[in-house]
């Protein structure tokens, strides 16, 4: 139901002045300043205002005659024109204006508005879409075709314009015109989707020859596109043209075989799958192998997976193993390509090739591995690298059995090592042992001699001496020991082994002289080992007086507890004699040593209570071992008391952190001193008291 707005009555001058007075603001006295029970937020006020605007916009003013309609159209057009003058570049105003004119059934005016909009922003392709849809809605096909022609001419790279144009022609059943549009589109060389769409268009109308011609033009237009050739071949395969499809793949392989295209892998995979579908298994296998030899290792991961899956399906056990090895080989190639100094990866790669057994490939991998020399001359970086050389030499000797190549490997390795900064005794010894196995003793001696001259090491001297000793060359052993000691005079092991050699030859005087020279050195790495060897030598020879003098000389250098105990046990070693007088003499000598040690630990180092207690326990055990000849009471009166005490613990900054328990020893002489002082004080007190009584 439409409502009419009632007319307002005329307002007089008096009433107008009254209304003006009523419109003036006046002071309103607030009677209640308390907050309202229902609070209204600003958001709620704005929301209600918007709802009121929507409701007011829905109220339509009825138009009863043509004059009112003309006035309404005039106002709307004036409003649109005013908006356009203010915002000339805002194309949305043009769209609303044109749509409004279309609603008024004024097609000419609407078309004029669309043209004005295109003159402002013709590169906005959505404007062309809406303009063409307007013409098609109004069944102006030729005008719509004109719009599409202009749009595709001005914006040929906007594919959606071509899609819509072709769709309109197909809906109209105008196939020839649609084909003409496609030809115009193809002349600007669009992307692959446009060519595929053209092929599908021809196939919809059963024009296979035309579709093939389109594909031919497609691959000529995109000669470097792998997907174009694959699509062409699949098209021929789908239409049953096996020969044509194979020809497409072969032409594509000729073009891309030597190119560094990232998509060439997909071409080989598609070609192999095509041959597999045609039951040409050997052809597919040859394609895979050809591709693996052409495609760079960094991009052949998917190709290897396809090849392994192919061999698992069609190959025998040997072929499957070859495919798996090829995949692992690819992984190792990728690792060593990324980091050539990763010697762990080279080791894994070498083990893989050795498991296959191809000598040429094994040598190739070894040569590639040893070509990656560590960049810095620090020994820790060379250790794994040298082991690659060692494995290479062992492979050539034991597996390949190539003696000349093995000798060449050892020689090249020894030339490469910077011997002035560091060397590896293992490689020298392995080279010498290799020559010995070849019965080339002169070559082995030459290698070991070079090792001693360039990089002398303990292992080299020991092994060289061992070899000469096994051969019975005593003079050479002596010369080697002399060079050994000249190079390392502080080496107690070398002195001991030299003396042991002379002892084994019954050269007692030479052995004793070597020991004397050894203990006379100013610096020794393990002097206790040397002195023990000297003492054991004299004991084994039965020279007890010399042994006793050695112990006394040793005690002049050190007063260590173990030396005292060892000396005492040596003195008591004659207890095994059957004569009782000798056993008593040995016991007395041992007691004398223990007594001297006890006095030294008591007087010189009073803080070494635990060492002194250990000494007394050894003495007590010795007395017990002599049975009736021993006297335990002689030691028991000297034994300390074991006490458990507590002491304060301090932190690093000096603050107390608590208490800890420890074991302390109190010897008899420490408890006697306080008792004597008490008796002296008591005697003095008694003497003073007696004098006072007499007075």
Image: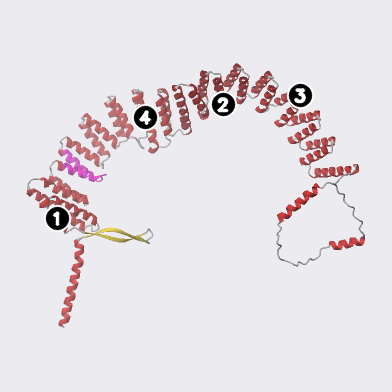
Question: Is residue 550 rendered magenta in the image?
Answer: no
Please tell me which of labels 3 and 2 falls first in the chain: 3
Image coordinates of residue 635 in percent, x first then y, are 16, 56
Residue holding disc 2: 266
Colour setting: secondary structure
Image coordinates of residue 370 in percent, x first then y, are 41, 30
**Res 8 label:** none
Q: Are marks 3 and 4 in contact (CB under 8 Å)?
A: no
For residue 316, above or below residue 582: above
Report crowding for label 2: few under 14, some 14 to 19, many 20 or more residues within 10 A (C-alpha): some
The Cα–Cα distance between marks 3 and 1, rounded to whole angstroms, is 132 Å
Does 578 sit left or right of 674 as displayed? Answer: left
Residue sitting at the far top: 243
Report crowding for label 3: few under 14, some 14 to 19, many 20 or more residues within 10 A (C-alpha): few
Residue holding disc 3: 174
Q: Please tell me whether mark 1 sits on a helix, a strand or a loop.
A: loop
Report crowding for label 1: few under 14, some 14 to 19, many 20 or more residues within 10 A (C-alpha): some
Residue holding disc 4: 391
Please tell me which of labels 4 and 2 falls first in the chain: 2
The Cα–Cα distance between marks 1 and 4, rounded to whole angstroms, is 66 Å
Question: Is residue 536 rendered magenta in the image?
Answer: yes
Q: Please tell me whether mark 4 sits on a helix, a strand or a loop.
A: helix
Residue holding disc 1: 632
Please tell me which of labels 1 and 4 falls first in the chain: 4
């Amino acid at each position: 139901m439409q409502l009419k707005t009632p007319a307002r009555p005329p307002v007089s001058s008096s009433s107008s002045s009254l209304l003006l007075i009523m419109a003036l603001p006046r002071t309103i006295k607030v009677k209640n300043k308390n907050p309202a029970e229902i609070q209204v937020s600003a958001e709620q006020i704005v929301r209600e205002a918007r709802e009121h605007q929507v409701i007011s916009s829905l109220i339509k003013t009825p138009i009863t005659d043509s004059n009112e309609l003309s006035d309404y159209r005039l106002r709307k057009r004036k409003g649109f024109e005013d908006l356009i003058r203010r915002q000339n570049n805002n194309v949305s105003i043009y769209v609303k204006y044109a749509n409004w004119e279309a609603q008024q059934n004024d097609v000419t005016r609407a078309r004029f508005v669309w043209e004005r909009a295109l003159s402002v922003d013709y590169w906005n392709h959505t404007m062309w879409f809406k303009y063409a849809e307007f013409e098609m809605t109004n069944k102006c096909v030729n005008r719509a075709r004109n719009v599409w022609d202009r749009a595709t001419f001005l914006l040929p790279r906007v594919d959606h314009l071509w899609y819509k144009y072709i769709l309109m022609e197909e809906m109209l059943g105008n196939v020839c015109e649609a084909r003409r549009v496609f030809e115009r589109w193809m002349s600007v060389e669009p992307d692959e989707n446009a060519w595929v769409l053209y092929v599908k268009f021809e196939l919809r109308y059963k024009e296979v020859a035309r579709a093939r011609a389109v594909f031919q033009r497609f691959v000529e237009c995109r000669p470097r596109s792998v997907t174009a050739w694959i699509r062409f071949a699949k098209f021929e395969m789908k239409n049953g043209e096996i020969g044509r499809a194979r020809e497409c793949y072969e032409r594509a392989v000729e073009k891309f075989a030597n190119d560094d295209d990232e998509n060439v892998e997909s071409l080989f995979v598609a070609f192999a799958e095509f041959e597999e579908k045609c039951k040409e298994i050997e052809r597919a296998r040859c394609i895979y192998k050809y591709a693996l030899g052409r495609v760079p290792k960094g991009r052949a991961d998917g190709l290897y997976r396809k090849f392994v899956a192919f061999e698992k399906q069609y190959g025998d056990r040997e072929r499957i193993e070859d495919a798996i090895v090829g995949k692992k080989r690819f992984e190792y190639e990728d690792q060593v390509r990324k980091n050539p100094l990763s010697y762990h990866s080279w080791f894994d790669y070498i083990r893989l090739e050795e498991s296959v057994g191809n000598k040429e490939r094994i040598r190739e991998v070894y040569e590639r591995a040893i070509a990656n020399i560590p960049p810095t001359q620090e020994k820790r970086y060379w250790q794994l690298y040298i082991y690659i050389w060692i494995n290479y030499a062992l492979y050539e000797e034991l597996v390949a059995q190539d003696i000349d190549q093995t000798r060449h490997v050892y020689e090249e390795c020894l030339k490469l090592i910077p011997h002035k900064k560091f060397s590896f005794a293992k490689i020298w010894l392995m080279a010498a042992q290799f020559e010995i196995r070849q019965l080339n003793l002169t070559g082995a001696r030459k290698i070991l001699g070079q090792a001693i001259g360039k990089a002398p090491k303990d292992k080299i001297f020991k092994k060289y001496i061992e070899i000469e000793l096994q051969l019975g060359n005593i003079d050479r052993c002596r010369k080697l020991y002399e060079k050994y000691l000249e190079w390392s005079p502080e080496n107690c092991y070398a002195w001991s082994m030299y003396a042991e050699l002379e002892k084994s030859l019954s050269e007692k005087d030479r052995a004793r002289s070597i020991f004397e020279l050894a203990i006379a050195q100013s610096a020794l790495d393990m002097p206790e080992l040397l002195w023990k060897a000297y003492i054991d030598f004299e004991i084994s020879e039965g020279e007890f007086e010399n042994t006793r003098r050695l112990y006394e000389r040793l005690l002049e250098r050190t007063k260590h507890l173990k030396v005292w105990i060892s000396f005492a046990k040596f003195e008591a070693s004659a207890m095994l004699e059957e004569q009782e007088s000798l056993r008593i003499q040995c016991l007395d000598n041992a007691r004398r040593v223990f007594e001297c040690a006890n006095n030294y630990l008591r007087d010189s180092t009073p803080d070494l209570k635990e060492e002194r207690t250990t000494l007394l326990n050894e003495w007590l055990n010795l007395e017990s071992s002599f049975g009736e000849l021993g006297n335990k009471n002689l030691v028991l009166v000297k034994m300390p008391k074991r006490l458990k005490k507590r002491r304060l613990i301090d932190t690093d900054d000096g603050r107390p952190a608590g208490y800890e328990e420890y074991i302390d020893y109190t010897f008899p002489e420490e408890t006697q001193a306080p008792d004597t002082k008490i008796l002296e004080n008591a005697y003095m007190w008694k003497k003073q008291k007696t004098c006072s009584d007499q007075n």
